Amino acid sequence: MSAYGLIGLSLDHSFSPAFFRQFFIERGLSNHSYSSIEIKDGEELKRFFSTSISQYSGLNVTLPYKEAVMPFLHQLDPIAQSIAAVNVIKVGTGLQLKGYNTDGPAFLDTLKEWDLPEMGFALVLGNGGASKAVQWALNQMDYTYSIVNRGVSKETIEYAHLQKRLVEKASLIINTTPLGMYPKVKECPPFPFDGINSTHKVYDLIYNPEKTLFLQLAEAKGARIKNGHEMLEKQALLSWKIWQQAE
């Protein structure tokens, strides 16, 4: 039996478990399993890596542990090292653990298929692990961007200080925060939607619900919208490719 799983805090409505269970059924991989591994805090995460890691051939990692798992790994893929966040772990011979990030490449692939202007400007909402993957992808496209976040920081703009002219300048706006994710579907980043028009493309990494309040409000202003479902499928397939690589 080859066991895989998803590490995270709250996984009731996560994408990966259902995706991989169906994936294994469709390919006749009856000796493969995929489980949700809910971990409540850092101490429990540490215990998992010390006592349970040997049960798995590979893992996905989601909020809030994409950065927290890194000290437990023996090696990082160059992309994961550049992004400084891990969402895929390969368990190798002798329990050697290597971390990867497929969020960045998967997001980049979806952008390439969305007919964006070259060398544009983007606004990135949030500054966590998912945001770092998005920033990596934007750098590959030679996009400039500003990060919008709660709180004061030298690297970010507060929502309250985000000016309409900067919103109008952006060709792409990406929500990397969990605001609006099921079941809290009435939540939304405090974004100034008055600056959005039909020239904008607005991307929310959330896939459940299919159309978050953030996307609804952007679409009402004429923007073209995209949710995170396609990106999640792409990153899951990249995870599988990594797990199947020969050492």
Image (cartoon, rainbow, N blue to C red):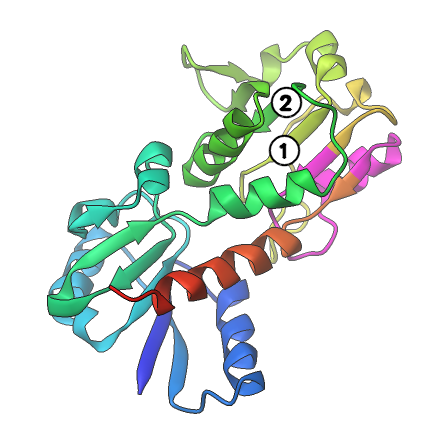
The answer to whether residue 219 is magenta is yes
Q: Is residue 98 visible?
A: yes
The amino acid beneath tag 2 is Ala
- Which label number is shown at residue 174? 1
Residue at x 30% of width, y 58% of height: 89
Q: Which residues are magenta?
A: 202-224
The reply to whether the C-beta atoms of the residues labelled 1 and 2 are less than 8 Å apart is yes
Q: Is residue 195 left or right of residue 124?
A: right
In 3D space, how far apart are the residues under numbered discs 1 and 2 (Cα atoms)? 8 Å
| Residue 77 drawn above or below residue 31 | above
Q: Position of residue 178 (x, y in %)?
A: 54, 44
**Left or right, 57 with reference to 9:** left
Quadrant where the C terminus lies? Answer: bottom left
The disc, 1 or 2, on the residue closer to the chain's N-terminal end is: 2
In the image, which disc is placed on residue 203?
none
In the image, is residue 149 part of the stretch drawn in magenta? no
Left or right side of 125 for 39 = left
Q: Which residue is located at x 58 percent, y 84 percent?
A: 26
Looking at the image, which is closer to me, 46 or 101? Answer: 101
**What amino acid is at disc 1?**
Ile
Q: Where residue 133 sits: x, y (%)?
A: 46, 37
Res 122 label:
2
Q: Is residue 148 above or below residue 154?
A: below
